[in-house]
Image (tube, rainbow, N blue to C red):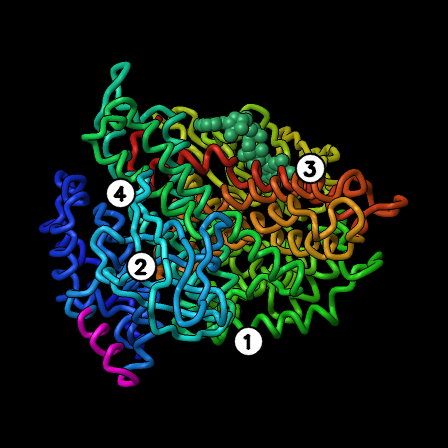
Amino acid sequence: MLPSDEEREMLRESLRRLLERLWPAERAIALAADTQAIASIWHALAEQGVASLGRDPLEGGLREITVALEELGRAGCPAPLVGAVLVNMVLSPLRSSSQETDDLLDALHRGDATIAFALGSFDGDPCAGTLRWNSDRLQGCVDFAEGCATATHVLVLADQGPLLVVVPRGAPGLAIEETPGLAIPPLARLTFDCVAAVPLAISQQLAEDLHQIAGLALLARSLGAAQRGFDMAVEYAKERRQFGQPIGRFQALQHKLANALMSLEAARLLLNNAARSYDFGMDNWRVLGASARAFAGPSLRRVALEVHHTFGAVGYSEEHEAPRHFRRIHADLARLGGVRRAREQLAQALLDQGQALPEQDLGTAGNAFRVEVRDWLKDNWVPESREDEIDRPYEEWGYDTRFTALLGRKGWNSLSWPSAYGGEGRTPREQLAFMEEIQRVGAPMGGRGDIQAHALMSFGTPAQKAEFLPKLARGEITFCLGYSEPGSGSDLASMQTTAERDGDEWVINGQKIWTTAAEKADYMWLAARTDRTAQRPHAGISLFIVPMKTPGLTVRPSMAMYGHTFCQEFLDNVRVSAHALVGEVNQGWTILTSALATERMMMGSFIANARAEFECLVRCVREVDDSLQSGRTDGAVRDRIGALAAQVEAGRQLFMNSIEMAEKGKAPIHEAAMSKAYTGELMEQLGQVSLDILGAAATLSKGAHGAVAAGWFEQLLRFSIVTVIGGGTAEIQRNLIALHGLGLPRS
Ligand SMILES: Cc1cc2nc3c(=O)[nH]c(=O)nc-3n(C[C@H](O)[C@H](O)[C@H](O)COP(=O)(O)OP(=O)(O)OC[C@H]3O[C@@H](n4cnc5c(N)ncnc54)[C@H](O)[C@@H]3O)c2cc1C
């Protein structure tokens, strides 16, 4: 059995303790320049089994390897683990084939051997050099070799075969020249002048896989360094005072740190996902690995910069920890072809080999439900104006009573509800499967009333539950959300609409605005002020169910940019019965914020939409004649496709993370905020990049001569802004991340 999550955490803990003891932060720079110190930490790590990682997946697979490298990166310790991993992976299956191999492995696992490595023409960097195998001798020159300062052996790849060769450091004809730079200890140039060696023929695939594994290992190390720098910066932001307050209270800084947290979390999730797929023997680990590297490159480098910006001058001193992490992050992420190589790998998979982004593993039940929903949609969702398989008309997105009733008959309007209320009690993963499939084909989601149903289940009276839940489940009624007011958007608690008790009735006066599809709804889920004297504005709000046909309620629709309506409502002495109140008087804020939290989490599911748009873009690029601009042979297009693929994958991981939190019964406050903010902005970016890649044709609407993908891109571009503003703007999400995810003071 593969090691468990708990065992991985134990490994992390024990390595952290060991490194804190033997490689303390205050001495890390001096120790890294001391070959004796590196040799002795390597022995200590070997005693913990670290030098054997990669030998047997049951003892520790790629996930354990990345944990160990994260800890080394965090401690600023250059112990030569990457070379050891490569040797273990290739030579361990050959144990007992030769005495030399056995001796090398034994010495490595004891901590007596240390391996430098350079991948030559498999490095991914065009300047890495090449080695040739001529008449039983190695000849050539390779750059960017890591771990030479203490190495007893060097591992290299030579062109013909390919061949993997492990050469003792003192082999006649091998010259090692340090090439100082950002990396500490420095990388080196290896010159082989007729060096005698015993080569091992390996497959092209294995050579490419070793490159990928080394790349993920370096990513893990830079992630550890980035996380450490970031943790220190956040603590500093809480303590350092300027202008009479902690600098962590300045929103400019909060939002940069919130962005950095998103980057770190996404990079970690991508790395874990790729390593997990590798450990489980899934082919998709290569695409997932390339996604992790393509995403992490620019993101973690940005984190390193923000760390420095937060520290100001104090972090610029070489005595501070920040510079060593800055060097490590930049040196590691530029290696092995860096971001460009990873993006090109993705472009090859998607554009040349016609692969799709890997399906998310939603577990047995989730995967099975995905297939069920997909099959059902084939029979039940056929947009009338469909012209080809990528035509999904966004004008029809939203409320579609016919379709909602169909979902009701199937029981899927209430799939997330507990069975006590007639629901299917589906897990968050199954709900995700449903949302992904619905969004993949652009079927309508609006009007299912999940927000109201869940709030009613928690706060409604028995009569309200009996009246509304069955109708919502059958898709017979729809609600609109009456929260926003002309003066109250993000600051909802400042709302001015009032509800006053008059006998058995409530009398509501005020104005609501931006209400989606109010003109089609049967009821408004309305928030109003019921105590004008409450000391905290949140404390005086209550929630009501208001039938849209109630006298005094006037609806004035206007057209929103995405081709849908939103409305203004004027409430002039609107009288509703006392039974219209949901929950207790003045309890509205609790109901409203728990509903907003659900909405925030669900808005992350727009990542399924982003994925569909991205896949449509890939199809369009594939179909463009290669002789034209924007064809799949255009290097700039390939680079952007690779970058976007990684970003979409990152968004999927962030969303999955908040789903997993919910599954564990924890409220994913800042996790959902990260997923929501990231996804919305990615949607916008997808829209923008589509125009860059496809040009003016992508701005044409459905039906226009020359329109691409039946006008889908221009529709989505217009729509994308909603995903940033709706459900709490991206800035509000960042405020939440700063407060709940980083513990920074309220700005
Ligand atoms: C298509 C669409 C449909 C909608 N449907 C509904 C609906 O059905 N029901 C409903 O009630 N509402 C709805 N809304 C309204 C939506 O919830 C609000 O637009 C949103 O909450 C933002 O409020 P606002 O537009 O007033 O912007 P404002 O709150 O005025 O914000 C303007 C800018 O200031 C920034 N800002 C505000 N406060 C802060 C802060 N504390 N820190 C940093 N930056 C800040 C915002 O991020 C934004 O960039 C809809 C909006 C759209 C676009």
The magenta stretch is: 96-107
Q: Secondary structure at mark 3?
A: strand
The residue depicted at 50 percent of the width and 45 percent of the height is 676
For disc 3, the marked residue is: 566
Q: Secondary structure at mark 4?
A: loop
Which of the labelled discs sits on residue 184, or is there none? Answer: 4
The Cα atoms of the two marked residues, 2 and 1, are separated by 60 Å
Q: Local crowd at mark 4 within 10 Å, few (<14), some, or many (≥20)? A: some
Residue 106: in magenta span: yes
Mark closest to the chain's N terminus, 4 or 3: 4
The Cα atoms of the two marked residues, 2 and 4, are separated by 26 Å
Q: Disc 2, disc 1: CB below 8 Å? A: no
Disc 3 versus disc 2: nearer the observer: 2
The Cα atoms of the two marked residues, 1 and 4, are separated by 49 Å
For disc 1, the marked residue is: 368
Whether the residue under disc 4 has CB within 8 Å of ligand 1: no
Residue 435 falls left or right of residue 462:
right
The Cα atoms of the two marked residues, 3 and 1, are separated by 37 Å
Query: What percent of the width, then of the height, locates residue 608?
Result: 59, 56
Q: Nearer the viewer, residue 76 or 439?
A: 76
